[in-house]
Amino acid sequence: MDIEIFPHRILGADTTEKLLNDIESLNSVKRTVIQGPRLPPQDAIDRKYGDRRVINVNGEDIELKVKTGRIFVELYEESAIDEIEVICNEHIANGFDINTSRSQYIRKQRTVSDGLKYGENTEIPEELIGLSDQRSQFSENVSIIKKDSIE
Amino acid sequence: MAQFYPGTSQVAQNRRNFCDPEYELEVLREISDEDVVKVLGHRAPGEEYKSVHPPLDEMDEPDDIIRELVEPIDGAKAGDRVRYIQFADSMYFAPAQPFLRARSYVYRYRGIDTGTLSGRQIIEARERDVERISKELLQTEYYDPATSGIRGAGVHGHSLRLDENGMMFDMLRRQVFNKETGKVEMVKDQIGKELDEPVVLGEPLDEETLRAKTTIYRIDGEAYRDDADAVEVLQKIHVTRSNYGYIPK
């Protein structure tokens, strides 16, 4: 089953890091998605005042690209919700909701967009479906180094 | 005694305070004249005011009883251009909100034009008067660096969740929170043009103060329906307006 953690304020990098580390350490958590507004462009203001940094979750470095507005968690068993609530209480200072009303929060089916992005016949492992950014642009994933010229 | 706003709640009292020109607004921070000019972005600090007509004294005006009765404001006397300042106020317990701003501005200031939308509020006046009014608005309880924004353009954000540090979303990143000093700095002017030096706007008010000073009824603060007096007056206005078009019969 899926749940949605909805903090009453948009979380910063520090809180996100602590929260994800604790959630990921639970055995009953299958996968986690963070969703929210994109971080601002990397410029002088962002370097001085911004909250952009690489966070470390369970030993893996992850570059944050969004501010944490919601966290979707897929669970093996429902009993983990109580443990997650304890974790959230510890880290989220300004209040949060845990929503369980929908049957799923993380997409489980392949979509047409997936087909267009990765190729219609490409096999995507099941656990990766729903984890990609639906609105990402082709140019964000592909670097064209040199254009071929036709002679 | 003038009746500004009904209700027995703290929110209603705050609304009355803002609207009552006799009430002296609490000064919460110091912002210099030069910084106000920088934030507004209409002229460079120290630059002469541009004018659209000669000073009134030098103009040959027709005889008119109203001209004799009404004392012109300083900017009009000098012939300044009309300029503006615009604010966006977060729904999360900002001290002021657009309709209250409009009501209180017309009680407090002369020679202004004010425009209200759901998420932003503009005040227009002659340039030197806008600067004087802006200084007052920024230094007093009208303004909180985190939940109010000085936004000439790109105002989106009043209804979005706040950041963890209490800042309202701003797509142009004009007001930014400095983690080292704990103060909010304005790095761009109100329309988003970068400033040479950031203007320090002071520390954000804490949540408790915001809840005490807010003029916004909220279900998780003071709910409007709990303020029986205010609801009664509103219903009375609604009924008399709907049934009789305000004509008592």
Image (cartoon, coloured by chain):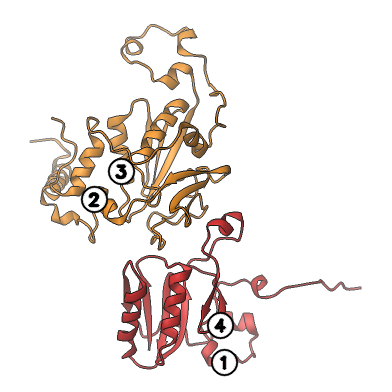
Of the pair B210 and B84, the residue shown nearer to us = B210
Residue placed under numbered mark 1 in the picture: A125
Label 1: chain letter: A
Q: Label 1: few (<14), some or many (≥20) within 10 Å?
A: few
Q: Residue at x 15, y 35 (%)?
A: B3
Label 3: chain letter: B
Distance Cα–Cα, label 2 vs label 1: 53 Å
Q: Residue at x 52, y 14 (%)?
A: B54
Q: Which of marks 2 and 1 is in front?
A: 2
Inspect this view and state whether residue B246 appears: yes
Disc number placed over residue B212 in the picture, else none: 2
Distance Cα–Cα, label 1 vs label 3: 54 Å
- Residue A140, position as x, y percentages in the image: 64, 71
Circle 1 SS class: loop
Residue placed under numbered mark 3 in the picture: B99
Residue placed under numbered mark 4 in the picture: A60
Label 4: chain letter: A
- Residue A51, position as x, y percentages in the image: 51, 63
Distance Cα–Cα, label 4 vs label 2: 44 Å
Chain in red on the image: A
- Earlier sequence position, callout 2 versus callout 3: 3
Q: Residue at x 16, y 56 (%)?
A: B225
Question: What amino acid is labelled 3 in the image?
Answer: Phe
Q: Residue at x 47, y 7 (%)?
A: B60
Hue of chain B?
Answer: orange
- Earlier sequence position, callout 1 versus callout 4: 4
Q: Is residue A8 above or below residue B34?
A: below
